[in-house]
Image (cartoon, coloured by chain):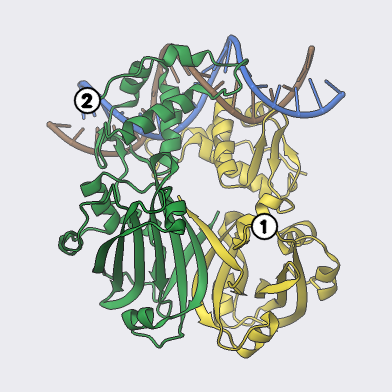
Chain colours: A green, B yellow, C blue, D brown
Amino acid sequence: MWTMPEICVSMRQMSSESPTYSPLYRQIKSLLVQALEAGEWHPGEVIPSEMELATRFNVSQGTVRKAIDELASENLLLRRQGKGTFVATHNDPRAFFRFLRLVPLSGDIEPSRSVPIECWRAKAGTEAARVLDLKVGDAIVIVRRVLEFAGKPVVADEIYLPGETFAALTLEMMEESRESLYTLFESRFGVRMVRAVERLRAVAADRASAELLHVAEGSPLLSVERISYTYGDKPVEWRRGLYLTHDHCYLNELG
Amino acid sequence: MWTMPEICVSMRQMSSESPTYSPLYRQIKSLLVQALEAGEWHPGEVIPSEMELATRFNVSQGTVRKAIDELASENLLLRRQGKGTFVATHNDPRAFFRFLRLVPLSGDIEPSRSVPIECWRAKAGTEAARVLDLKVGDAIVIVRRVLEFAGKPVVADEIYLPGETFAALTLEMMEESRESLYTLFESRFGVRMVRAVERLRAVAADRASAELLHVAEGSPLLSVERISYTYGDKPVEWRRGLYLTHDHCYLNELG
DNA sequence: GAGTGGTCTAGACCACTGC
DNA sequence: CAGTGGTCTAGACCACTCG
């Protein structure tokens, strides 16, 4: 159960003098993130109304509003006029394309399917440990899978996960699930990916990938290396995908 | 000279009944965009203070603030506390990396140089016409250039521009300019790129590109096709770049 | 109609910049 | 010091949803 932190008043006056000044609405924002992280409200659920939160935190509605505004713009929350504010979830077509920027060249919408291939345990090497913020030798889980669009293989993924959190992950679990991987992680492991960084390069297909994607060895593939983070910028996934960009392209908006 | 539109009061009451209702702050926002588009304030300049604008438009400071907030988040304006609000400009290192998401794998910062190669006039084909919103046969300007990092060629670009706007563009102009291409477009042609969409694929190097980038024919290259837009979502540039991703990668943040 | 988020206002005060 | 953007408040009203 969640208990109300009673620090609002003491927080407020850390103005002027303090070297770590942050405005009230950011403190509220961080309290909301803590509540999300602690699982006070689950993905897809409504959170209390702005007025209720304002009463709880002893601030005005406008201050809560500004905190929620930022969280909504970071896609942690979702506002729906007349209904309330909801915890964002990956179980939502919009979230799907936020993290998989692959679109068919034809523009048509294609059904996609995730085909898990392998899932095994290993110990973190120096690079996996660095990326996932673990110690060398810590347990990790490695998953290999293929993503199909319109029945054809388009992406070959290799995914590294911290072993502690994902100890229970099995191939069967992924095979049975009709949801996306991130939806599975969210519903079964309580891990919600919040943001990610991708590094893209063009590479030549090695033999294994060439077989998985049904192309000739040496064909150009788009290599997408991704590090995903949950609440508090904690890295929880390291993934390398090889994308076949013959009939698809990686779409990116530069704001 | 700019004249004050006097429609605020009439605009305000298009509530309830109207099918095209938009809140007051969005109407203010669109007036500000019109002013930017009309060249009322130039890139790098301060715009009037929030209070002044509020008086002009007969709204409260808060409403102007919300309009400016959105424009700042879209990178059209730049707020600086204590100094004022400025028209965003490409003559700024931050803007540079917003539109060129290429970073060295080593992490070091490398000096870049644009080497223009060719610049010629042509008539728009069906595809160029469609993308640039022109008629087939309309004049276009085509530029080829190479981007070097640390003295080595990394990007080969082919750039299509509407001929009318860029009639005066010459190779010499680009050679003499030490600014980025977008800075040149902004200062010499009054065209500010505001947003862009990129489509990425992995391709094999053809002979021409292989020579430009000093790699073997058939090497995997990252193909980046970009359409850039100015104010009002008007397309003004169509560009295809081939990126050598041996020592660099395309960095993308998924929010 | 009651409840939610969304807009708009007016006024007070704070933090930063530059003269 | 005056002027700018940034925060915070309180209250009114609008638009949307649902029972």
Q: Which residue is mark 1?
A: B108
Mark 2 surroundings within 10 Å by alpha-carbon count, few (fewer than 14), some (14 through 19), many (20 or more): few
**Could you tell whether B118 is left or right of A15 in the image?**
right
Q: Position of residue A131 (x, y in %)?
A: 45, 53
Q: Which residue is mark 2?
A: A1
Residue depicted at x 30% and y 39%: A87
**Could you tell whether B49 is left or right of A243 in the image?**
right
Look at the picture and state if A174 lies above or below B59: below
User: Which chain does tag 2 point to?
Assistant: A
Amino acid, disc 1: Asp
Residue A5 visible? yes
Labels 1, 2: front one: 1
Cα distance in 3D space between marks 1 and 2 = 48 Å
In-front residue for pair A119/D15: A119
In-front residue for pair B56/A188: A188
Q: Position of residue B209 (x, y in %)?
A: 64, 84
